Image: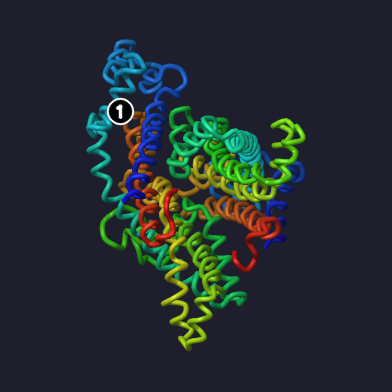
Amino acid sequence: MTRLGVWLVGVVLVAGLLGPMVLPLDPVAQELPLRLAGPSWSHPFGLDELGRDILARLLAGARVSLLVGMVVVSVSVTVGVTLGAIAGYAGGIVDDAISRVIDVLLAFPGLLLAIALVAVLGPSLAHVVLALSLIGWVGYARLVRGHVLRAREWDYVQAARALGASTPRILLRHILPSALPAVSVQATLGMGAAILSEASLSFLGLGVQPPSPSWGTMLNNGRVHLLDAPHLTLFPGVAIALLVLGFNFLGDGLRDRLDPHTTPQAN
Amino acid sequence: MRYLARRLLLTIPVLIGVLTLVFALIHFIPGDPVQAMLGETAAPKDVEELRHRLGLDAPLTTQYVRFMRGVAHGDLGRSLRTGQSVVSSIAERLPATAELALAAVALAVVIAIPLGVVAAVRRGSWIDHAAMVAALAGVSVPGFWLGPLLAFFFSVELGWLPVSGRGSWAHLVLPALSLGAALAAVLARMTRATLLEELSQPYVQAVRAKGASPARVVVRHALRNSLIPVVTLLGLQFGAVLTGTVVTETVFAWPGIGRLLIQSIGFRDYPMVQGCILFIAVTYVTVNLVTDLVYGTLDPRIRYE
């Protein structure tokens, strides 16, 4: 499963990065006489409602999806790990303040807060990234806070403290490296979740705006042509599902390998 | 009783935080929120009138107190588009959303638990592998793609079920299936994992040694205990179902709160957007609270210290 995950993610990554160089197709160029045309040799995935090449748009959309996933996960990990480590190590009022913010943000189900934020900020890719990062850090902060709370009592951490190591050094050198496996698993699964969230927001008309290609927007536009041109819906849907599945396989495989508490059988 | 009181007390600051954040939403609008609601071409007189009507001309603290008092009295303002009370608009659509969410949860449970049990009992077999790949696929396939695909096959090709709208039970099947698929996937994985853990416990071996049939061992003994974390997960995942209704209702033109939210965003009807967000978030907090209480009842070892 892990290998399949590597393959799926790898294929999309290579296609997204190298595809536009190998296949010099313009994702916004229109061939109106051929609108809604099905797959052919010149257009392997067919054309959309404005006569744009679906393969070219899928490749450009892959870049958007991967970019959103990477930026959201990077920002979320940085903010979440920092705040989680501070909350767990400092304790007291600092921990209480950070934990209450986490509790409030966790009280909003899934995408709802992102929908709300994008609704008031206005639909755009930058706002999607901002909204997803604002809710994304919470999971990492909770994970790391719990880990630091346990780790600060460990003997070697106490020994480092007794030897006069500074708080940043204890956190960065002695505690946080042991949280890395769990954070990596969550980050891998988080990539899939961020990509799915961006696609959902774009599908709802709140994400990437036309004519820029996004898999979610392509699905939304293709939905009205489900009867006369199902390829408009089929290809972006398969692309989203395979990429998210790839990250989920990868995350699951990493968890089995890195987390001693779980075994492949128990998952 | 102390557990109940303590858990209820812990919910209060979270609810206040949720209300504060929903209140703040309107102030996140870049520039002038009233101008954004009416558009750039609006007359200054209209802008001032709406600003006064929404109370946005008052100091922030006064606005906050007014908002909290309004929520306490069940007053979330009026829709900018229809003039109807936000609370009554939500109440009108609540039955549709509740029907869809509950049907999705019921469908997910009916599919997931047998699937998880079969996968655990036949661990390592092709059924186990197929069930778990299906479960991972269920988490990965977006509901907004699954919905149109289901509609294409079952409504257009086979003509068995209606494409969209609300009415008979037949209208409910496809939206519930589309919304419940991801939940079913998560629950099936959890059921399998917890059942495997229970099956390796000494009490299960004792029951086996006493000669109980394999079915009795699983259904009467191991499954009962393994369902406790599954119930918790079901409660936690209810949030995903609630958010999922926004997408599913849009796909199937289901007249619920999720669709109202998206339509209100399109019309920049911010009081309605605020109301819908608040309603969904408070429902989620309440469901989590109930889940925790049920968990405490199911497993007496669980107590807040």
Q: What residue does disc 1 label?
A: B68
| Residue that sits furthest to the front in the current view | A162
Q: Nearer the viewer, residue A36 or B168?
A: B168
| Residue that sits furthest to the top in the current view | B44
Instruction: Kindly identify which chain the residue marked by label 1 belongs to.
Output: B
| Local SS, label 1 | helix
Task: Locate residue A130, reporting x and y percent.
Answer: 55, 32
Q: Nearer the viewer, residue B292 or A200?
A: B292
Residue B203 visible at all: yes
Identify the image quadrant of the C terminus of chain A. Answer: bottom right
**Residue found at x 36% / y 50%:** B3
Task: Locate residue A170, reporting x and y percent.
Answer: 72, 36
In the rendered view, tell whether residue B42 sits above or below residue A141.
above
Identify the image quadrant of the N terminus of chain A. Answer: bottom right
Task: Locate residue A210, reporting x and y percent.
Answer: 54, 35
The three-letter amino acid code for the residue at tag 1 is Met
Task: Locate residue B286, reporting x and y percent.
Answer: 34, 46
Residue B253 visible at all: no
Judged left or right of residue A189, residue B192 is left
Q: Quadrant of residue A75?
A: top right
